[in-house]
Image (tube, rainbow, N blue to C red):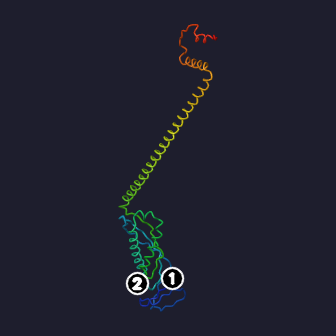
């Protein structure tokens, strides 16, 4: 007997003994038959089948399971062959997968990778409960969803709907961003107008105060010499009224003419 296998001894077709430990064993020739069952873990590729999600989308689910024989006597008694044991295990897996994924929306199944581990553990646990209940003598170590696709007839329609939904969501974000931009620009414009208005008011106030101070300085300066102030005002009036084309006729003895000619008393 080799390591990693069970030896099943049958007599007239009935199982009379199962050897689990390696070593030298004997059988009765012509009366007893010996067959082997592997103790090693096996991979069973579950047939892909169609399920319906919570939001009524159809999907093709492809699973595989890693399993092994835990009790060869129970397996032979209730399943008879490993092929039958795998078939029953596959039925349990599909039933549980259909139930669990039927509680989820299509988009969650294909996008929530983080929840796959928890889902696989739940499916594995439930399958083992059914196998133990019916005493099939096998145990499942892991059940995995290796592929989840849309039926070919629905694939384009669903993908187009997903694109439409994503475009709507993108447009929503763009509209919200544009509205926020307009609000920000309006707020900045309002603040700028307030600042400019305040600056203009301050400038007018400063200009008025400057002009008032300048007038006061002029008054203080000119009040000290009335004759000089009168002369200054006269000259200023000439500067405003006389240009290069102005002709003035004055008596020679007028004060203005004498002033222009350089005669001073």
From this view, report whether residue 55 is shown above or below residue 65: above
Q: Is mark 1 on a helix, strand or loop?
A: strand
Residue at the location (36% across, 61% down)?
154
Tell me if mark 1 has few (under 14), some (14-19) or many (20+) residues whose alpha carbon lies within 10 angstroms of its own. some
Q: Which of marks 2 and 1 is nearer the N terminus?
A: 1
Q: What element carries label 2?
A: helix
Where does label 1 land, which residue?
Answer: 5
Measuring from the top left, give residue 222's x and y in whole percent: 60, 23
Q: Quadrant of the C terminus?
A: top right
Residue 98 position by quadrant: bottom left
Measuring from the top left, give residue 5's x and y in whole percent: 51, 82
Q: Image check: 259 left or right of 186?
A: right
Q: Image check: 36 left or right of 222?
A: left
Residue 264 position by quadrant: top right
Q: Which of marks 2 and 1 is in front?
A: 2
Residue 95 position by quadrant: bottom left
Measuring from the top left, give residue 236's x and y in whole percent: 57, 19
Where does label 2 land, which residue?
Answer: 78
Q: Nearer the viewer, residue 263 or 100?
A: 263
Tell me if mark 2 has few (under 14), some (14-19) or many (20+) residues whose alpha carbon lies within 10 angstroms of its own. some
Q: Nearer the viewer, residue 253 or 220?
A: 220
From this view, report whether residue 1 is shown above or below residue 122: below
Gap between marks 2 and 1, in whole Å? 20 Å
From this view, report whether residue 181 is shown above or below residue 119: above
From this view, report whether residue 4 is shown above or below residue 107: below
How many numbered discs? 2
């Amino acid at each position: 007997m080799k390591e990693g296998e069970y030896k099943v001894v049958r007599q007239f077709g009935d199982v009379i003994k199962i050897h689990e430990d390696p070593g030298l064993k004997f059988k009765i020739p012509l009366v007893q038959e010996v067959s082997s069952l592997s103790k090693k873990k096996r991979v069973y590729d579950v047939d892909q089948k169609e399920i319906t999600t919570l939001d009524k989308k159809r999907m093709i689910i492809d699973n595989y399971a890693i399993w092994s024989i835990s009790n060869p006597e129970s397996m032979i008694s209730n399943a008879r062959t490993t092929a039958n044991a795998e078939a029953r295990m596959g039925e349990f897996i599909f039933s549980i997968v259909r139930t669990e994924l039927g509680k989820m929306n299509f988009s969650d199944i294909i996008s929530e990778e983080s929840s796959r581990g928890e889902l696989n553990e739940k499916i594995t646990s439930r399958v083992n409960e059914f196998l133990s209940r019916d005493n099939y003598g096998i145990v499942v170590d892991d059940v995995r969803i290796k592929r989840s696709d849309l039926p070919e007839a629905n694939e384009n329609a669903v993908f187009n709907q997903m694109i439409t939904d994503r475009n709507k969501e993108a447009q929503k974000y763009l509209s919200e961003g544009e509205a926020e931009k307009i609000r920000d620009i309006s707020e900045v414009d309002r603040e700028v107008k307030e600042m400019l208005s305040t600056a203009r008011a301050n400038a007018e106030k400063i200009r008025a105060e400057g002009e008032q101070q300048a007038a006061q300085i002029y008054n203080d300066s000119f009040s000290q010499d009335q004759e000089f102030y009168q002369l200054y005002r006269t000259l200023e009036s000439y500067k405003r009224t006389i240009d290069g084309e102005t002709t003035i006729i004055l008596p020679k003895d007028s004060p203005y003419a004498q002033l222009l000619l350089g005669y001073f008393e």
